Image: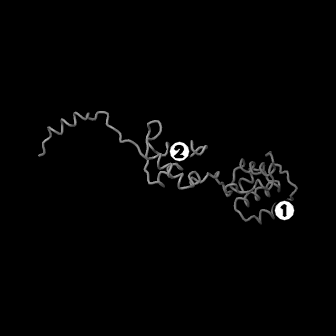
Amino acid sequence: MARRIKLSTNLSVDELEQRYRRASEGMERSHWQLLWLLAQGHPAYAVAQMTGYSAYWIGQVARRFNDEGEDGLVNHRRRVHRPARRPDPRTLLPTAQDREELRAALVGPAPQEDVWNSRTVAAWLSARAGRRVSAQAALHYLRLLDFTPQAPRPRHTKAASPEERAAWKKSWKPR
């Protein structure tokens, strides 16, 4: 004999049916229907055949309803998940004087014999602001000040030395 799922609710079968019929959101309506059918005494496998849901999922919905009540039936996929608010990058250098300090630093050599790119500007801004600054915010300031991320041109490992290039230029004859 199949084990029946017990619902711990003080709602009657008629009240569960009314909630099922009044539900406006599709998933919530389906959950109320599952509970209504279970409250009528149908086993999970029979409810699964009637609704198209698996018996396992029906048990999960019933368990969530027993644990959380009506809040457990809400469609959680419709909730808006807002990311943590990041600070506005413009607050790092609010005045023109602050931006001129960064411009003066960018004209000079980069720290640790590196090149000025978003990573090094982020490190410079982090030291100045006293908090972590993202490379994206640093790139915003590079573009704001009309600087491009600088990187040295790569050299080929088998490239000719300056003396070899000078010798080749002397021996080269146009056709």
Seen from the viewer's position, the closer of residues 1 and 141 is 141
Q: Position of residue 99 (x, y in %)?
A: 51, 52
- Mark 1 and mark 2 lie on one chain; the one further toward the N terminus is 1
Residue 129 as seen in the image, left or right of residue 46: left
Which is more toward the observer, 47 or 13? 13
Residue of label 2: 122
Q: Amino acid at mark 2?
A: Ala
* Residue 162 coordinates in the image, percent (x, y): 25, 35
Q: Quadrant of the N terminus?
A: top right
Q: Which structural element holds mark 2? A: helix
160 relative to 94 in the view: left or right: left
Could you tell me residue 53's position as x and y percent? 69, 53
Q: Residues within 10 Å of mark 1 (few under 14, many from 20)?
A: few
The Cα–Cα distance between marks 1 and 2, rounded to whole angstroms, is: 60 Å
Element under disc 1: helix
Among the 4 quarters of the image, the one containing residue 50: bottom right
Report the residue at 29% width, 33% height from top: 158
Res 152 → quadrant:
top left
Disc nearest the viewer among 1 and 2: 2
Give the residue type that dot 1 points to. Glu
Disc number placed over residue 15 in the picture, else none: 1
How many numbered dots are placed on residues in this image? 2
Q: Can you name the residue that lies furthest to the front here? A: 97
Image check: 79 left or right of 6? left
Residue for point 79% across, 52% down: 65
- The residue that appears at 57% across and 44% down in the rendered structure is 128
